[in-house]
Amino acid sequence: MTTISIHPVRESAVPQRSKFPLNQWYVAAHSSELADKPVGRKLLGEAVVLFRIGDGTVAALEDRCCHRALPLSAGTVESCGLRCGYHGLLYNHEGKCVEIPGQERIPSKAKVSAYHVQERDGLIWIWFGKPENPEPMCDAPSYSVHSSPEYVYGGDVYHYNAPYQLIHDNLLDLSHLGYVHLHTIGGNAKLHMNAEMKVESEGDFVRVVRYMPDSVPPPTYSAAYPFKGNVDRWQEIEFRVSHLLIWTGAVDQGTDAMDDPQRGGFHMRGFHGVTPESETTCHYFWTMATNPIKDIEEVKRKVLEQTELTFDEDKVVIEAQYQNMIRFGPKSMIDIHVDVGANRARRIIERLMV
Amino acid sequence: MTTISIHPVRESAVPQRSKFPLNQWYVAAHSSELADKPVGRKLLGEAVVLFRIGDGTVAALEDRCCHRALPLSAGTVESCGLRCGYHGLLYNHEGKCVEIPGQERIPSKAKVSAYHVQERDGLIWIWFGKPENPEPMCDAPSYSVHSSPEYVYGGDVYHYNAPYQLIHDNLLDLSHLGYVHLHTIGGNAKLHMNAEMKVESEGDFVRVVRYMPDSVPPPTYSAAYPFKGNVDRWQEIEFRVSHLLIWTGAVDQGTDAMDDPQRGGFHMRGFHGVTPESETTCHYFWTMATNPIKDIEEVKRKVLEQTELTFDEDKVVIEAQYQNMIRFGPKSMIDIHVDVGANRARRIIERLMV
Amino acid sequence: MTTISIHPVRESAVPQRSKFPLNQWYVAAHSSELADKPVGRKLLGEAVVLFRIGDGTVAALEDRCCHRALPLSAGTVESCGLRCGYHGLLYNHEGKCVEIPGQERIPSKAKVSAYHVQERDGLIWIWFGKPENPEPMCDAPSYSVHSSPEYVYGGDVYHYNAPYQLIHDNLLDLSHLGYVHLHTIGGNAKLHMNAEMKVESEGDFVRVVRYMPDSVPPPTYSAAYPFKGNVDRWQEIEFRVSHLLIWTGAVDQGTDAMDDPQRGGFHMRGFHGVTPESETTCHYFWTMATNPIKDIEEVKRKVLEQTELTFDEDKVVIEAQYQNMIRFGPKSMIDIHVDVGANRARRIIERLMV
């Protein structure tokens, strides 16, 4: 066995898992990302290669050939494994090297680490357990919206040059809609800042609910749904450590109850998987589902277009915020009325990292 | 109050003011830069946002919302202050938060630092005092050329990836004109290297004067002024810690005395505000004024175009010089005859930083 | 003499020559690179400027004016030396300043270091000796292929963001051709992985020979030479610390002996100068010579085009490999059958660095 010494700048040599909440399923990819090519992605500080073999099984391995360290994500997917692009070593979905071209004997050390993955409802989840017990303690979360006939959806993955918790903060406090997203899903700023907000939490779970009865529908809503005039509008945000579910929408004023899960009207249901890449960067896997009553493709297209614009705006704000936090160093921040939910989520994360 | 811990790479967390001469007015911006948008700029290691409110008052605040640290320079200017682009907190020109949308009580801690600024003759100056006495000890410098009817002028601000003193060196030694600016304001190289040079200094002030009697006018001069043949040419450089004033020009040979401030001929009067951004980078605020005797706009355009070319050439040289200084590390440099003025300026800066 | 203090990030202030094998000639440039402009290049951690004066002599100096540290490579070549682009100091080919414009006396300290260089067969070689004995112990290597009438050749220099030894590894193990260069010089992957390989070494020299008798010629070969069918193909790799010589080719099956240096058929003779820039980066000077039997320019063009494609592919692989080595930190690597030659070369380098 050869150790080739390398030099400077190690990015994250010693994986520092304890910097993130462990014993959690995190989103590693959208199902749609894994077709015929491997995907290399750093998740919770670990360089992982994701791929789907011939029978549809998804695998996640250490992204490094055990021979000369080429990223396996630069290799090619075959029906029964992933082949390195340098000297052709073939790995199965468990990380075992099953072929070394030109060499009969395969050393027992010819293998790489494998991660637990589960595919559910269009999402690939990866489990990061605590070192003393790396086995999953439960199944990956389901997300029925993705398979519901009522909804159509689309999504994307964004790379953020900012720590994952800044995205939590952003999503748990939708009062920023009035300032950041004025022209899309926001609408009137004062309306948002003055909306009544209810915050509940239990265990590793935070729920923030805001109602804006008898309000003017924002541009995205009006474009997608034939509201008659003012609307009763709701925002329900559920924080679940590795992801958030946000159900926003509106009914014509005075029709359905805003807190009835069977309410009609216009719905936007967002899935937000926020997976740390490192302590200072993260991946943001989002989908947005909506319930068009006609012109399905057209409404879906418009809603996704507006969603993308909105999430682009958030990315600009959050990355600028983080750069400024770096620039000014640790300084205390004042809290205002909208921060209750975000602060509870921060306390949960802090507790889970012990 | 929440302290959100952040991670790596702090750029300049603890402002290290003592790295620069303090108790000085530095140029922060051209007046023309402050219209309806805020300007974010790091000055002497401090991240500052500059803006102009409805009554014309210019303000300079810490560029960081006290709520969640977004740069205030990403916000919007209103008639009576600057509003943060995330949750809408409004700050007045003294840095006091005067509105938190949706919240009645404004905590006393909701404020950011403000800097002393003065606007004079088309320039915005900012005072950086010593920690024990941050109050300005004098008014910001005037610069009458900008308001003189004899002159027309224009200018710009350049960002330099080089320490500010390398610009001082460059401006205090115009002998480089023959090598760096051969095709614009330079002309004959030997002429410059052999010109007689007089260096005077007193207090925090250095003056370098060079005369080139009976010489061929350089391309920029000939293009701008109907010289009859050879000229008597002068260069007067005044170093004043945070800025330099350079008055160059020429008269037809044998007419006005070169050292008479009332001399005629063709004038180029440069203002050079050199404001450190950090110890290794700086802002260079320059204007160039000239005195056309006809075709005013045309001459102004030409002079500014040539000036810009010239200053672009200097930037290339100085940034390459600095990269090479980094590459080679601290090595002694030999001095030659042209370095007298620059070395005096360096001794002044050194004295002022104690 | 002035010491201007500079600040942060020193790239390689103290040259750490002992990090590389010394007492060696390394390639510094192709002869064709030195026409009327100087070339600045960091070699073994030293910033060097190369230039050719009027009589054809090539010189290599420290790339730093002794006055104000501008890179001399930003200056201009004159018939008897190199002139700095800031204040015009002129240096001769030994690094002595021979003119300071406007100043009569030239201080004895006005000089920069010079390096031993030799130009041979289209290559400029530079000697890096051990500190206690910096004089060359031999002449620079000859390379007769470049002046042979049998061959035509071309080449280039690539900058690599990877340590030089990873290129040695790559070149000493041509089994990667089947995976990395399938569409050019590779051809059948299994063929390469199963080819018999002979490795010899002696002193600072490693020789790897592989024969692939009765095999299908790869695309590049077929395009360049009228083979009748299957071929007897050879690969001879010679490792010589600062450069490698690789002679590959093929004859029609069953004609000339594959190990006869007088063999006919189609030849590709590669010169590979691998010169460290720093511990983590290097320069790769390559040429490829071939022996067209007709359509000389057309075959040369095709062979060079294919070679360039091939070397581009290698660069992608090797730089990705190095990034992954940084990412994962020091981890042991398993060896496979193809690594024998490369591992011997690594042991030679290790021995030479003591």
Image (spheres, coloured by chain):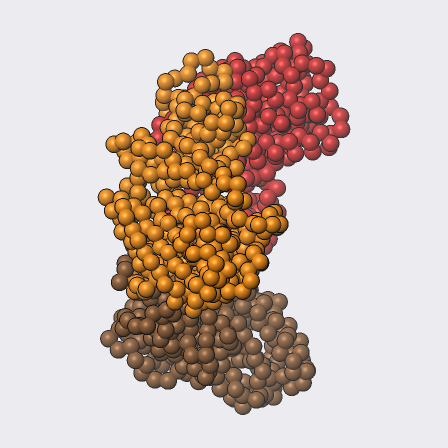
Chain colours: A red, B orange, C brown
Quarter where residue A128 is shown: top left
Q: Is residue A236 visible?
A: yes
Q: Quadrant of the C terminus of chain C?
A: bottom left
Q: Give percent across and percent down for residue A11.
A: 39, 49
Q: Give percent across and percent down for residue C50.
A: 43, 73
In the rendered image, the vertical position of residue C256 relative to residue B218, given as above or below: below
Query: Which residue lies most toward the front here?
Result: B255
Query: How many numbered badges does the structure rendering display?
Result: 0
In the rendered image, the vertical position of residue B165 relative to residue C93, given as above or below: above
Residue at the location (62% across, 27% down)?
A183
Residue at the location (38% across, 28% down)?
B114
Q: Quadrant of the N terminus of chain C?
A: bottom left
Q: Give percent across and percent down for residue B199.
A: 32, 56
Residue at the location (42% across, 56% down)?
B258
The answer to which of B270 and A5 lies nearer the viewer is B270
Residue at the location (31% across, 76% down)?
C129
Query: Which residue lies most toward the bottom here?
Result: C262
Q: Is residue A261 left or right of residue A91?
A: right
In the rendered image, the vertical position of residue A36 relative to residue B77, given as above or below: below
In the rendered image, the vertical position of residue B283 relative to residue C11, given as above or below: above
The answer to which of B218 and A141 lies nearer the viewer is B218
Q: Give percent across and percent down for residue C152.
A: 58, 82
The answer to which of B137 and B275 lies nearer the viewer is B137
